[in-house]
Image (cartoon, helix red, strand yellow):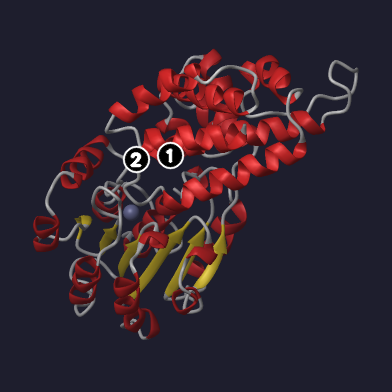
Amino acid sequence: MFSRFLGNSHVVTALQSMLAEQRLPQTLLFAGPAGVGKATLARLLAAALNCKPGPAEACGKCTHCRRILAADPSLPYYQKLFEERAGLTLEKRRENPLVVSTHPEFLCFPPDGPLPQISIEQVRRLKNYAQFGPSEGRRRVFLVDQADRIDTAAANSLLKTLEEPPPYLTLVITSENAYDLLPTIRSRCVPFFFGPLSASEMEQFLASRAEIGADDRRRLAAWAQGSPGRALAIDIEVYERRREAMLALLRAGARASDFGDVIRHTEVIGRNKHEKLELQLDVLYGLLQDLLRLEAEPGAGSAGEKRQVINEDIRDQLASLAAKVDFQWLERAVSKVDELDSHARRNIQKQIALEAFAVSLR
Ligand SMILES: [Zn+2]
């Protein structure tokens, strides 16, 4: 099964040789961009450690492998569960802390709630489970997924288990950025750094999805920036609508259009409760990155090699916007998005925040 994992072969090879030599660390940190397979690899690791023929490989066929690999939070069943839980009261979530498990040896603790966080109740549950050794398989593996979303109290509660994990337990922690974790957590784990997939790996991944047409495949490969998970999560129509809105903000900010155009979009965003600000900001970052690249491109229209952009399908629109702004403007825009991003996990008013962003750039 390890050979089917696309990308980050340096991590896969290292883990496999550690498994073969039985010197896998007990506390591991998987750090890298969202959607490149950190949690998937943690599941594969848990499967291998419990696989009947294992432990250097997960056969994918035995009962341990099949059940462990089924604990995939990206599956529609779990997505629906998470959505339902986001609507529960805090008390209800506390009473029944979230844990995803389809096999007693593999437990996954993902962020929970409307502003997803890993709670102290989840960590308490983890510690309770950690008291017991394996019952069906050989080794217990607990995954704390997106641990940068753990609150301080929960993080402190987890420290003890990270310091002295029981001998039968392996703990895997994932985070987009290792430095978003408390230093006390980070320093207790052996880090493995993941990167985005290469263009050919992304091609290979998207080609394996028969349901995606060739034209969409090209667009998704560019938009997903080396992240298969991201590519699968993108709804082309929704992305285009979101991008249209963010482009309107930037155009108004650059005084390339009037402000009425912004309000037309932000009103719609403000009304849509499910439209998280983080998703808008993600698109905004992508657009700004493209504008920076186009800004740096020598003499527009010259014969020089074109720089790759994420939003290749609207390159002309971006190039004409890039011609209206300078580096200072782009720098300011990026720092304003950073500012918005740092507030995004709180419940801020999306419409007001986005309009204020556009105004601040004028
Ligand atoms: Zn197996």
Instruction: Name the residue type under label 2.
Output: Gln
- Mark 2 C-beta closer than 8 Å to ligand 1: no
Of residues 340 and 107, the one drawn nearer to the viewer in this rendering: 340
Above or below for 97 versus 128: above
Q: Residue at x 82, y 29 (%)?
A: 297
For mark 2, what is the residue?
349
Residue 127 visible (yes or no): yes
Rendered view: 29 above or below 292: below
Badge 1 local density, few (<14 within 10 Å), some, or many (20+)?
some
Q: Position of residue 33 (x, y in %)?
A: 53, 49
Instruction: State the image coordinates of residue 270 (x, y, percent, origin top left).
Output: 33, 30
Say if disc 1 is inside 8 Å of ligand 1.
no
Q: CA distance from mark 2 to mark 1?
A: 6 Å
Q: Would residue 205 appear left or right of 91 to someone viewing this image?
A: right
Mark 1 residue element: helix
Quadrant position of ligand 1: bottom left
The vertical placement of 17 against 204, above or below, is below
Question: How many numbered callouts?
Answer: 2
How far from the left and from the top, in percent, is residue 334?
62, 43
Q: Which residue is mark 1?
A: 353
342 relative position to 141: left or right: right
Instruction: State the residue at coordinates (40%, 22%).
Output: 238
Q: Identify the image quadrant of the C terminus.
A: top right
- Give amino acid for label 1: Ala
- Seen at 28% across and 51% down, the residue is 62
Task: Tell me which corner region of the image, top left, top right, bottom left or bottom right, holds residue 78.
Answer: top left
Identify the mark at residue 225; answer none if there is no mark. Answer: none
Q: Is residue 168 above or below residue 114?
A: below
Q: Are marks 2 and 1 in contact (CB under 8 Å)?
A: yes
Near-viewer residue (291 or 79): 291
